[in-house]
Image: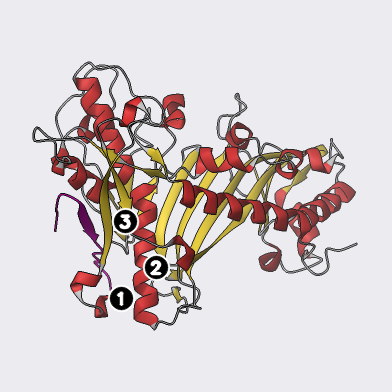
Amino acid sequence: MLTISSFSIPLSCTQPREFEGLPVEDRRLRYSIVPTSGRQKVTRNRFALEPDICLTDYRCEAVFDWIDLLIELEDPARACDLGKIVKSRKSWHDCGVRFLDRERQDKHEGVEFVVRVQEPTLARITEILRLVNDYRCVVSADFEGTEIVGFELAVDFYPKLRIPSGDLELGLRRARMSQLLRSHFILDWAWVMNGLGSDELASPRFSDAPRSKLDLIRPFPSKIPPAGMSRMVHAAGSPSRHVRAPINGTVYIGSMRSPLSYRLQDKVGDRRHDAELFVELGPDQRRSRIEVVLQRLDWTETGGPRAVSLGSIDEMLAARLSILQQSLFNFQIPTVGADTSGHPSTEEIDIFSKSGAYGLDLYLRSRGELAGRPSLGKKGHSLRYTDLNKMVSRALGKAVERFVRDADVCPGLAA
């Protein structure tokens, strides 16, 4: 129900979730509509959409799922032989190391390799590179200067178990956080301006079934956008083209073929794309997740992790977490304009409730471009979601600390 001062987003599902046993009126993420202070010109005479959620009810953790390193050997070698060097010390599966070519393909032979290390730590990477160096000399023996050409970094939010509640309440609080993340995440517009959106890779999509992806902003099937405007931004200017993803649906931005991609999910299991291999997580392991993959694909440029000052092991050790959070995990409080009566725009609120702050931002940019108004700046009409961003920054700091401190290398790899 929409009033002048509040509204709510229903937590709908197309697959079973435990919180569905609660009353419908409870299965919502509620918002207050608050006039902005007007100190900034871009938010003057607008209304902020502030979520009714207590962030202290959650703990936040960040983890590097994998890191890709680029190494060059003095003499050619085969990926399978390099793999055997690691496998001879410990099982291949447990150590999670793969030797790939620049296209991230197996069965490679040559002097250049992308080494993908699962659950990376400084100790594990150093030891793996030492083993490779002993077998075929690495051109640069300065392991800490080894170039990072890709990584997957995840941020998880767990409902705190210390709060007296059953599985239904835990599931509801998790669902609210899952909705919060997808509603307030905005892709840093600098990435789009640098080409991520040139072939629609910045278009948000979702999937609630294996091998099926739907657009959160549905492009027009036949309309041709004006010169210089992408199909995604063109469609975003029409409220009817915005849709809402169910809580059980994974939201995607980008793809495997893009340098930057995201997944936001209400994570209740592993191997969810294969019904036979699906592993259901226990209530204390279910969580709300946002994960980013940043990888260097254009080898004629110096993009990828270097763009966020994580281009080498040395840079990771001196990581500026504020840059990492602002560039990759950008959460904003959206604002809406006033209608002709001076009340908050119900049209803009409806768009936000469907495709989130990112969809609303694209809508406002599209309408501005079509009307010939000056382009919005990087932040658009949004305000920083300070408390959530600080929570993420602290988690990122702990992830880097674990990377440096953790000496839990694969048994058998230690010298």
Visible residue check, residue 356: yes
Q: Are marks 1 and 2 in contact (CB under 8 Å)?
A: yes
Q: Earlier in the sequence, mark 1 or mark 2?
A: 1
Q: Amino acid at mark 1?
A: Phe
Look at the numbered disc 1 and give the secondary structure of its residue: helix
Cα separation, mark 1 vs mark 2, equals 9 Å
Res. 273 image quadrant = bottom left
> Where 273 sits versus 148, above or below?
below
In the picture, the quarter occupied by the C terminus is bottom right
Is 306 or 146 nearer to us in this picture? Answer: 306
Q: Are marks 3 and 1 in contact (CB under 8 Å)?
A: no
Is 99 or 239 nearer to us in this picture? Answer: 239
Read off the residue under disc 3: 207
Look at the numbered disc 3 and give the secondary structure of its residue: strand
Residue 174, disc? 2
- Relative placement, left or right, of 292 versus 172 is right
Q: 10 Å neighbourhood of mark 2: few (<14), some, or many (≥20)?
A: many
> Where 318 sits versus 399, above or below?
above
Residue 19, disc? 1
Q: Position of residue 148 (x, y in %)?
A: 68, 40
Is 75 or 262 nearer to us in this picture? Answer: 262
Q: Earlier in the sequence, mark 3 or mark 1?
A: 1
- Magenta span of residues: 1-17
